[in-house]
Amino acid sequence: MGQVLTVAFFGLVALGFGVTVFRTSSMVRSALSLLGAMAAIGVMFLAMEAEFLGVLQLMMMAGEMTIMAIFMVMYMMDPGGLGQMEMTHQKRLSKGVGLTGCLGAVALTLLVDWGPTVASAPPPTTQVHDLGIELMSRSMLVFETAGVTILVAMVAATVVAIARHRP
Amino acid sequence: MTVLWLVPLLVVGTYIIVVLEEWVTTGRFRPVAPVFGGISLLGRESLVPRLPDRVLFEAAPGLLLVAPVLALAVLPLAPGTIIANLATGALFLNAALAYVMVALFMAGWGANSVYGLVGGWRFLGQFVAYSMLIVMPITAVAMRAQSLATTTIVESQTSLWNVIAQPLGFILFWLAAMAVCFLPPFDLPIAPHELAGGIMGEYTGDRLAILRLARLVLILTLSASVTIFFLGGWLGPVLPPWIWTLVKTLLVAAAMLGTGRFVPRLRQEQLVAWGWQFGIPLALTNILWVGVTLLVVA
Amino acid sequence: MISGARLGIGNRVHRFVATMQARELAAFVVPGIEVARAFGLDPEAAGLRIAVSPRHADLILLVGEIPEGLAQAVAIVYAQMPRPRAIVAVGTGSNSTLPAPDVSIALNQESLVAGIAELRSLVANGSFNPDASGFDIAETRAETVYVCPMHPEIVRTEPGLCPICGMRLVPSEAANGDIHGDMSATHGREADQEAAEFANTAYTCPMHPEVVQSKPGTCPICGMTLVPRQSTTQEAGRAGHSSGPTSRDTDDNDQAGQSAPSTDHHLHSPSDRSHAHHERHDNVADRVPHDTHEQLTNHQASGDQHSMMSPDMHEMQRDPHDGAEGRHSHGGTDMHSMATMDHGAHTGMMGGFMSMVAMTKGLPRSRDGLPMEWVEAPFGPLFPGLPGGLDVAFTLDGDDVAQVRVSGAMMSRQLAQTWPGPSTTFPDRLARLDPLAPVAYRLLAFYAIEHAAGILIDPSLARQRIAALEWQRVISHLNWLAAFGAVLGDRWIAQSAAALHLRVVGSSVATGIDKFQTDLSGFIQRLGKTPLLKRRLDQVGILAEATDALGPVARANGKVVDARLEDRSYRGLDFAPVVVNSGDAHGRLQVRLGELTQSLALIQAVDVHAAQETPPIAEASGAGTATIETPRGAATLHVTLVDGRIQEVHLTAPSMRNVGFVPVVATGQEVADALVSIASLDLSPWELNR
């Protein structure tokens, strides 16, 4: 019961923050509201005993969203939102996609029989262990490739940025 | 309910750290300083600067207080005395500490002051420098314990504390911990004589009290994490386990507060450069070293 | 009731809290903690903590004479302090802008301790008072005016919409209402005129100006809410609009050298006429004349960087016209091109996005290569990391210093008028010039008068004067070292140097010098072993060439410039100036450390036993010049004596020369490095303006 309540509460929190992302005209508040929504989702993961996923969600999103907020301050003209400019575009398309996604998610939630999956989900300690084994055995190539690719992208981006601004 | 012991322990711990900090910085030992200071601060006006981002300005001290308290929730005081024994406890600690950066950025931005904003940006750079150095030694520690749960990590040190088994990781984690709680020489966001108080400069009255309290809890949390991960937590001969944890935590805090005053504040670019050019290769070496020793010894 | 009491009944709870507050007092020292130290005061020994920000301070400690020009800054500092707040005046007269001090004491440590004890009882009883009032000064009163982010010349007193582009007006601070006056006079009329020209109000999309409707709604292309626009200006604004979504695309093309359709011409020379959009721009430019932009005052309070960048541009424009002292570093920027750039940018932005990359396009890149908006930030005159009284303003590019404006104008005390007079008291009057090195100026006065009167002094007296001068040098360098350590963030250096300084500041040469010498050399040795100190200071604050530099600043650049070389009395003492060949902050630190040791050695060599006696200054006439090496560099004094009275005085002080290096040394550095560089110059703002 407590689990359901927590998930429901933080789901509503995530929804609320998500709405704030688009309603506010301050760039920084928008980025931090997105962080709030992501953090709420992370707590939902924790409540649903997907611990590793939840912790990763919380950890990564904190750094990412703040850095995004700072980039917004750097690159956008009115990051404080004092001008209250309308910053949203393509409203029809967004509504369409959003509605479709929402219907799809609801359909997925209601129409799929989650019983067997939930029953076979291991407790968090076993999850961490199994995740580690999985990373090191079957999915090793996938993650190594992904990791190296990201590293190369980081180095390349830095090099490109430096070369560009050399006077 | 284990939550009940957390609050008095927090109070006692922060009290002792305040007294320690004053002793170290000014040489005066005044046991009543926290009481006087706290009450006098609460009795002062709490000013709000002009055109602040009100939401962020108000939320920042609270978030800075909540983040380390959440991190403390996964650190054990004694075997079985832990608020939330998550299977991914060590990683959760890191996730909670990431919100310190969010809080400091909010504080810098919300106050609408150049000094605060520069302090917030500097802490972002500091975050980029220390974030890897916080996580990688935890990885090495978890390797030895074969688990991310903090209780298991302490139990894995029964034969040998990690400070001896992984000294490189200890040094890196120590430095990164000092950087997280922006103690000198890593006090770039506060920078007393460079930024007139930096992030904290625009806060007064009760908001400042919460901010200062949050900083103290942060120091306590980081000291506790150093103790848990590297100094054997509750392990020790004669005294009950929880006393050992407390004593070790306070010793670590005293050392962190005391050693910083002899070194000039690092330059922003030096900090980031050293963190990435030296810190990360050393951390990787540490992981390699631990892996080799585990395979060879076990 | 203390002068800054908090509004409250004064019941038991308030009394209890007030008692606590009386025990925990933090002081903000005006004009600077180094001045307090120079007078021999130790606030921490009196039980005070030192606050680095007025917001964290409980009382303001006024030390010594506060120049009239600083009074305004002091009032602003006092206004920033949260209540309850108190004023303690140490050895100073009443300040014109502040309320009467709560405690007024003499300028020595015993009085300070007694005064603080008295203050504690005052605070305990008077922190909360039902009759408390606020402190209202002109600077803290700010009107909120509403400006258009696109058109800063549109200023209104109520919220609304911009008549040109239809954007919602943004609240902004304007001090004292002067922006309001100027604006409505000229720009308001401009805008109203334009508004009157266009009768029809059409609704259009900010992104797609071709969409025009006569009633509100949403844009069929992108779905944005339509905004009311003047139809004719809409086309003129089109150029600016389309710069929005395309600006980011065109940035990618920039490197290839293509000129982007709209972005480029905003910020580069408007003579680029390759696009049809230009004609629209020129039309708009005609309507809003360029020189009216000059009248925009800085509606950025010390941190309102959320608003437009144009005010920053104007700030940069006005800087070259800011006469007075201090040179302005252009950092390689041609001011003229800034002006045209601003013109283009300003009239071009009629809505739509302009990314920071486009906005900062023409500006010189800071050292870290990251383009950010330029913000003007004041770092003086009462900033804790800089010498008290030095008015420095940085234009920050992110956290790098793009431009520096420095002035000592606030330190004017009209001292030059007090100098002519009896020559017997002239040395004391001259010593008032610089509280950080009074003995040096007193000696300078003696030498100049004796040279004018043709008096030859006894060699033993000359040696005593050498001892006095070198002792002053030791004191001054220790005081500087304490401040420098504080800026560096190394609390050990700051505290140890301050402790050593406190030991010697009150004493004359003859007492206890041997023990002090061992302690000092021990300190300097440990200082040299401080880890990371060299890393911190290396290549920071580099002076490529220090022509016209004086004192340790010149000697750190390898120039053998020292007034003591021409002094006969130093001949027998085997004196060689300490010269280091690195023009950075580390070099200057090394020179001053070397001079500390050297001065003590000189004092030992001179072997002073008796106290200094001054020979009688006869009723003489003549003109004389003297130069001595003060701790900050050579100071030259020229006096004209007529019958024992001083008639004319010309003084050149070293800080006046060295202050010119502030922009050179600080520009292009990160804020921390800029402050360390300025601190390493060891300026005395008291010498800058008499």
Image (cartoon, rainbow, N blue to C red):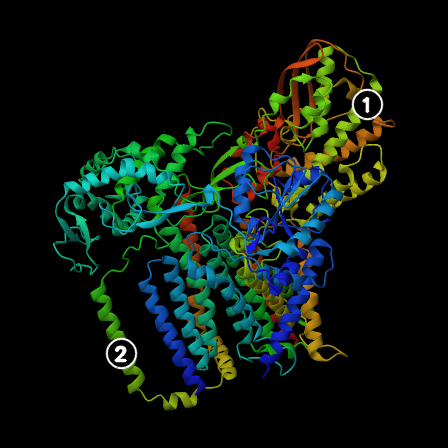
Residue type at numbered disc 1: Arg
From the viewer's perspective, is residue B52 above or below residue A56?
A: above
Q: Could you tell me which residue is drawn at 82 percent across and 41 percent down?
A: C518
Circle 1 packing at 10 Å, graded few (<14), some (14-19), many (20+), is many
Disc 2, SS: helix
Q: Could you tell me which residue is drawn at 87 percent across and 26 percent down?
A: C610
Residue C371 vs residue B4, the one in the foreground: B4
- In the rendered image, residue B100, in percent from the top left (x then y), is placed at 52, 63
Circle 2 packing at 10 Å, graded few (<14), some (14-19), many (20+), is few
The answer, for residue B189, to whether it is visible in the render is: no
Disc 1, SS: helix
Q: Which residue is mark 1?
A: C463
Residue C363 in the figure: left or right of residue C242: right
Check residue A104 in the rendering and tell me which mark sits there, or answer none.
2
- In the rendered image, residue A131, in percent from the top left (x then y), is placed at 48, 78
Residue type at numbered disc 2: Gly
- In the rendered image, residue A1, in percent from the top left (x then y), is placed at 43, 88
- Determine the CA span between mark 1 and mark 2: 95 Å
Identify the subunit bearing mark 2. A
Q: Which image quadrant is residue C7 in?
A: bottom right
Identify the subunit bearing mark 1. C
- Residue occupying the far right of the picture: C609
